[in-house]
C-alpha cells in the first residue's frame, strides 16, 4: 500500500507518474481524440493546484492557522481534477493506474482534513478507500487505513454527516461508516474496532444490529482470533435483533 499521509510531495509524485503514463499511452492510442488538448491542460491545472496547496501550507506555518473555506473549496477542485484524470486513465485502458489514483484521492482528502477543511463530496473518496481496502490483506496496513478513514470521517461536512437521505442505502456516508467497521475488524486491532464501532452505533444505529450479526458470522467463517471475536461479541450482545432504537 502506498503512503497515505496527506503529504503534497506524495500527491505530486503519484500524479506525475500517472500523467506521464497517460501521455505515453495516448501517443500510441486513438482512445482519446482530444487528449492532446486535455492532458496538457489538466497537467497545467494540477501544477497550479500544487502551487496553491504549497502556498496554503506555507501561510499556515507562518500564521499558525489556515482558511477553512479556502481549503474546502480547493479540496473539492482537487478531487474533481483527480476524477477527470481517473476517467482519462480508464479510457486509455490503464487499469494498473487505479491504485495510485485511489491513493491520490485519499491523500487529497487527508490534506483537506489536516488543514481544517471540510469534505463536501464523498463518493470518489469512498470508492478509492474501498479499492485500497479490497487489495490489502496485511492487518497492520489495514490498521493504518482504519486510522486514515477516521481522519476523513472527522472532516466530512455537516451537510453530509447529518445523513438526511436515509432512504438511499448506497449513500457514500453510510458506505464509509460500514467500511470503516469492516476495515477495523480486518485489522485485528481492538482499539481500531472500538473506535469504528462507536462511530457506527452513534451515526448509523439503524444498521448496527445487522452489522454486528453479520460480523459474528464472519468470525466463524474466517476464523478470526479470540481478541477480535471478543469485541464483536460484546457489540453483538449490546445490539440484539430485538433492540429498539427509541
Image (spheres, rainbow, N blue to C red):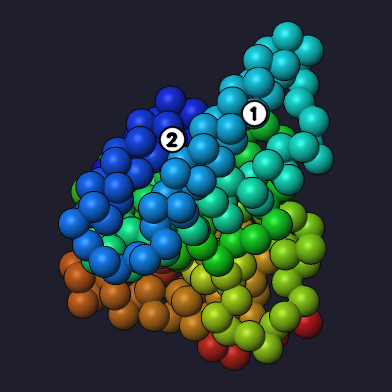
Instruction: Please state if 142 lies on the left or on the right of 65 as rendered.
Output: left
Give whichever of 220, 174 is nearer the camera: 174
At 55% from the left and 81% from the top, the residue drawn is 170
Instruction: Please state if 217 lies on the left or on the right of 171 as rendered.
Output: left
Q: Where is residue 236 in the image (x, y as percent from the top left)?
A: 47, 74
Q: Position of residue 73 (x, y in %)?
A: 73, 45
At 80% from the left and 31% from the top, the residue drawn is 67
At 73% from the left and 71% from the top, the residue drawn is 163
Q: Position of residue 145 (x, y in %)?
A: 40, 47
Secondary structure of the residue carrying numbered label 2: helix
> Which labelled disc corresponds to residue 52?
1
Instruction: Report how far apart the C-alphas of labels 2 and 1 lie in the structure.
Output: 13 Å
Q: In which quarter of the image is residue 173?
A: bottom right
Residue placed under numbered mark 2 in the picture: 11
Q: Which residue lies furthest to the top in this view?
A: 62
From the viewer's perspective, is residue 123 above or below residue 194? below
From the viewer's perspective, is residue 217 above or below residue 163? below
Within 10 Å of the Cα at label 1, are there few (<14), some (14-19), or many (20+) other Cα atoms?
Answer: some
Could you tell which of marks 2 and 1 lies nearer the N-terminus? Answer: 2
> Which labelled disc corresponds to residue 101?
none
Q: In which quarter of the image is the C terminus?
A: bottom right
Give whichever of 209, 135 is nearer the camera: 135
From the viewer's perspective, is residue 41 above or below residue 65? below
Amino acid at each position: 500500500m502506498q503512503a497515505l499521509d496527506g503529504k503534497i510531495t506524495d500527491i505530486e509524485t503519484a500524479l506525475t507518474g500517472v500523467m506521464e503514463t497517460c501521455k505515453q499511452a495516448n501517443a500510441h492510442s486513438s482512445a482519446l481524440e482530444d487528449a492532446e488538448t486535455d492532458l496538457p491542460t489538466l497537467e497545467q491545472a494540477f501544477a497550479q493546484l500544487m502551487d496553491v496547496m504549497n502556498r496554503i501550507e506555507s501561510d499556515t506555518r507562518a500564521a499558525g492557522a489556515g482558511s477553512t473555506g479556502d481549503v474546502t473549496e480547493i479540496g473539492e477542485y482537487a478531487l474533481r481534477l483527480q476524477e477527470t484524470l481517473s476517467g482519462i486513465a480508464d479510457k486509455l485502458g490503464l487499469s494498473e493506474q487505479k491504485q495510485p489514483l485511489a491513493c491520490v484521492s485519499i491523500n487529497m482528502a487527508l490534506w483537506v482534513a489536516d488543514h481544517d477543511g471540510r469534505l463536501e463530496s464523498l463518493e470518489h473518496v469512498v470508492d478509492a478507500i474501498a479499492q485500497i481496502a479490497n487489495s490489502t490483506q496485511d492487518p497492520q496496513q489495514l490498521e493504518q487505513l482504519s486510522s486514515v478513514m477516521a481522519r476523513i470521517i472527522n472532516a466530512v461536512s455537516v451537510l453530509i454527516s447529518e445523513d438526511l437521505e436515509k432512504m438511499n442505502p448506497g449513500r457514500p456516508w453510510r458506505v464509509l461508516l460500514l467500511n470503516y467497521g469492516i476495515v477495523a475488524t480486518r485489522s485485528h486491532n481492538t482499539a481500531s474496532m472500538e473506535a469504528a464501532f462507536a462511530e457506527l452505533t452513534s451515526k448509523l444505529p439503524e444498521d448496527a444490529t445487522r452489522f454486528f450479526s453479520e460480523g459474528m458470522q464472519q468470525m466463524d467463517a474466517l476464523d478470526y482470533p479470540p481478541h477480535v471475536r471478543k469485541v464483536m461479541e460484546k457489540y453483538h450482545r449490546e445490539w440484539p435483533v430485538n433492540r429498539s432504537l427509541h
